Image: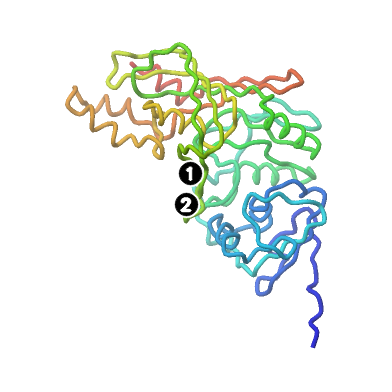
């Protein structure tokens, strides 16, 4: 007996998972608004309440199919593509435990027109949901603007990184800015506090980087000869050479836009970012200085609850430019008797 072809549910601007069958396979047809998006991001937005780690698991296992073929998480969708989604169960909203990272977000808007929003993101807020976070910045922004037909992140910042973040309100704006980012035509500058006696007024770090995912779906980066070309220019802003350990405030100019680029480049040259618990674990650094006048006051000054990285300036090709001042937590850390 010949089985009838599967019924294809049209993805109506990302059909919500509670509208899909939780006990059977579903097929989603990609519409024009979803075209160009990575399939992992498409699934995380479509499968509301499903942990990010589970989305990556069903991609790795081949349970998700694109036009009947297996696909990796970075595959980009085209209008008319058909995505096979296996049965999944979402977490009940009541079962989610509220946390500080899930707080309602009232964005400080630096700029807005009919195509773009520039936001000054606080540290501690993830840009999107997943990994135990019910709603990130983009989900909260969409919830606050239900009449906006299109809101997409132009780029990302780590949860602990503060500063300028762009959100597109039109597909055309998103596509144009992505092209500028790929071609290196966006001027992105960060302020970063690092450990160690930094002596160069200007230093270029060119180290190839390789991105990979842990078993839990977390993104990580390492230096690898076969990795992608990655270039960062560092300029010295201020030093505290007599402090234990010595500290320096740098401006970092991105010439390429790799994941965790600044963090890994600085760790690779022996100057990890203050507070970076992944690429420069503070606990290991503190042990080196216990014999040099360690006090509780010094410990308070050295400890920072997040990595000291701030997106301070972003300029796009049409001469629009946005500036974000060093946030209070980093300004206080830098000036608090150091």
The quadrant in which residue 70 appears is: bottom right
Which element type, helix, strand or loop, lies under badge 2? Answer: loop
Which one is nearer the viewer's eye here, 172 or 208?
208
Q: Position of residue 218 (x, y in %)?
A: 50, 49
State how far apart marks 1 and 2 are (Cα).
Answer: 7 Å
- At 67% across and 21% down in the image, what residue appears? 315
Which residue is situated farthest in the left direction here? Answer: 291
285 horizontally vs 193: left or right: left
The quadrant in which residue 288 appears is: top left
- At 54% across and 39% down in the image, what residue appears? 125
Which element type, helix, strand or loop, lies under badge 1? Answer: strand
Q: Position of residue 320 (x, y in %)?
A: 73, 20
Q: Position of residue 37 (x, y in %)?
A: 71, 47
Asked whether the beta carbons under mark 1 and mark 2 sit within 8 Å of each other, the answer is yes
The quadrant in which residue 176 appears is: top right
Which one is nearer the viewer's eye here, 183 or 225?
225
- At 57% across and 22% down in the image, what residue appears? 189
The quadrant in which the N terminus is found is bottom right
Q: Position of residue 179 (x, y in %)?
A: 73, 33
Q: How many marks?
A: 2
Tell me the tag on residue 214: 2
How many other residues sit within 10 Å of disc 2, few (<14), some (14-19) or many (≥20)?
few
Q: Which residue matches tag 1?
A: 220
Q: Is residue 50 above or below residue 194?
A: below
Q: Is residue 150 above or below residue 56?
A: above
């Amino acid at each position: 007996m010949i089985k009838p072809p599967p019924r294809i549910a049209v993805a109506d601007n990302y059909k919500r998972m509670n509208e899909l069958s939780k006990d059977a396979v579903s097929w989603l047809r990609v519409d024009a608004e979803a075209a160009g998006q990575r399939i992992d991001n498409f699934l995380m937005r479509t499968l509301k309440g499903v942990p990010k780690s589970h989305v990556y698991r069903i991609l790795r296992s081949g349970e998700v199919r694109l036009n009947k073929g297996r696909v990796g998480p970075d595959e980009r969708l085209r209008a008319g593509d058909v995505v096979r989604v296996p049965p999944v169960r979402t977490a009940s909203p009541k079962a989610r435990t509220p946390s500080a990272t899930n707080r309602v977000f009232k964005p400080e808007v630096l700029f807005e027109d009919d195509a773009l929003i520039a936001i000054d993101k606080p540290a501690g807020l993830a840009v999107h949901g997943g990994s135990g976070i019910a709603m990130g910045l983009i989900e909260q922004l969409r919830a606050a603007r239900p009449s906006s037909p299109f809101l997409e992140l132009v780029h990302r910042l780590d949860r602990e990184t503060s500063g300028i973040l762009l959100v597109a309100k039109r597909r055309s704006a998103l596509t144009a800015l992505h092209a500028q980012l790929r071609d290196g035509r966006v001027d992105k500058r960060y302020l970063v506090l690092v450990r160690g006696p930094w002596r160069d007024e200007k230093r270029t770090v060119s180290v190839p980087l390789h991105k990979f995912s842990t078993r839990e779906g977390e993104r990580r980066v390492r230096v690898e000869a076969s990795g992608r070309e990655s270039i960062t220019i560092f300029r010295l802003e201020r030093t505290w050479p007599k402090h234990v350990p010595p500290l320096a405030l740098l401006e970092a100019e991105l010439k390429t836009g790799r994941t965790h680029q600044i963090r890994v480049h600085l760790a690779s040259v022996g100057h990890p970012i203050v507070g970076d618990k992944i690429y420069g674990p503070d606990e290991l650094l503190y042990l080196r200085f216990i014999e040099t006048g360690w006090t509780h006051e010094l410990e308070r000054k050295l400890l920072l609850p997040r990595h000291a990285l701030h997106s301070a300036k972003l300029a796009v090709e049409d001469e629009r430019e946005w500036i974000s001042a060093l946030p209070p937590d980093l300004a206080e850390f830098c000036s608090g008797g150091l």
